[in-house]
Amino acid sequence: MTTTGDERPLGIFDSGIGGLTVLKEIVRQLPAENLLYLGDTARVPYGIRSPETVRRYAFQCTDFLLQRDIKLLVIACNTVSATSLGHIQEKISVPSIGVIEPGARAAVRATRNKRVGVIGTEATIKSSAYRKAITAIDGSMVVFGLACPLFVPLVEEGWTDGMIAKLTAERYLKDLKDEDADTLVLGCTHYPLLKGVIGEVMEGVALIDSAVETAKAVTAVLDELNLRNRSGAPGSQRYFVTDSPQKFSEVGSRVLQDPLQEIERVEI
């Protein structure tokens, strides 16, 4: 290790653009780190796939990033974190982080009445991964899971506000409002991009953004393993997609509030 630390990049992947919410937070908290982002946009959404299919896709994304000498893998996808994180950790030597454990810890800290809602893809909710993670921390927690499968395509189209997004949120969340949960985990990295309309529908409920919590976990792991980039130069971001770079650039630029550079279409 030199005085500049470890300049190798972090690898981040998601099924589409949702993981950019995690990347954005990592850039904010760790501006010196070099980042590689893979969006498997040709096969989005993952949340409607079987666990076996998701795991196959996840290993393909992981292998792609490992070939580029990453020092840490960030699985910026709740569906993959729920179905595949343990499998990936068993197979690779590079440290890896998912998004569920950080979100679960934040939910336990935030709730006052110990009633927590979780919204996510069908695969994430069926896995009960958040319920297991939350109750492992505090067994007295009551967790309500709700699948919201239309949220991902809305975000991928860039329809994150307006009447369509609002009506969709109202339709999905009306039953959850009756459960008296005071905290709601946005259990998909696409969902923070709908935080405005979700917050309107769930007024007074604390929203847990796993992207923020995951970036904090990345910082902790880099410090624990002495892997920080200490070169002093601003980090770089490079993007790979498995479908149209143009669509990814259009929507992704709105997510990051900055034009995306270095986007390459790849086969994985």
Image (cartoon, rainbow, N blue to C red):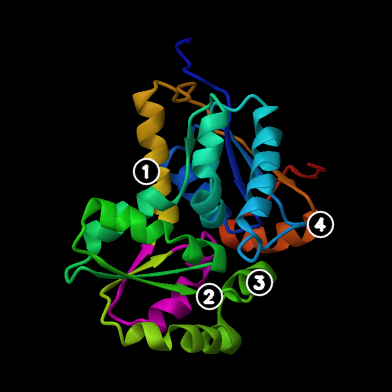
Question: Closer to the observer: label 3 or label 4?
Answer: 3
Image location (x, y in percent) of residue 215: 42, 45
Task: Say what amino acid the circle numbered 2 marks.
Answer: Cys
Foreground label between 2 and 1: 2
Whether 138 is among the magenta residues is no
Within the magenta stretch, is there residue 192? yes
Foreground: 236 or 223?
223
The label shown at residue 153 is: 3
Say which label, 2 or 4, has the lower sequence index.
2
Q: Residues within 10 Å of mark 4 (few under 14, many from 20)?
A: some
Is disc 3 placed on a helix, strand or loop? helix
Q: Which residue lies under the disc numbered 4?
A: 244
Whole-number angstrom distance, CA of label 2 to CA of label 4: 25 Å
In the rendered image, the vertical position of residue 267 relative to residue 134, given as above or below: above
For disc 3, the neighbor class at 10 Å (few under 14, some 14 to 19, many from 20) is some
Q: Is residue 222 visible?
A: yes
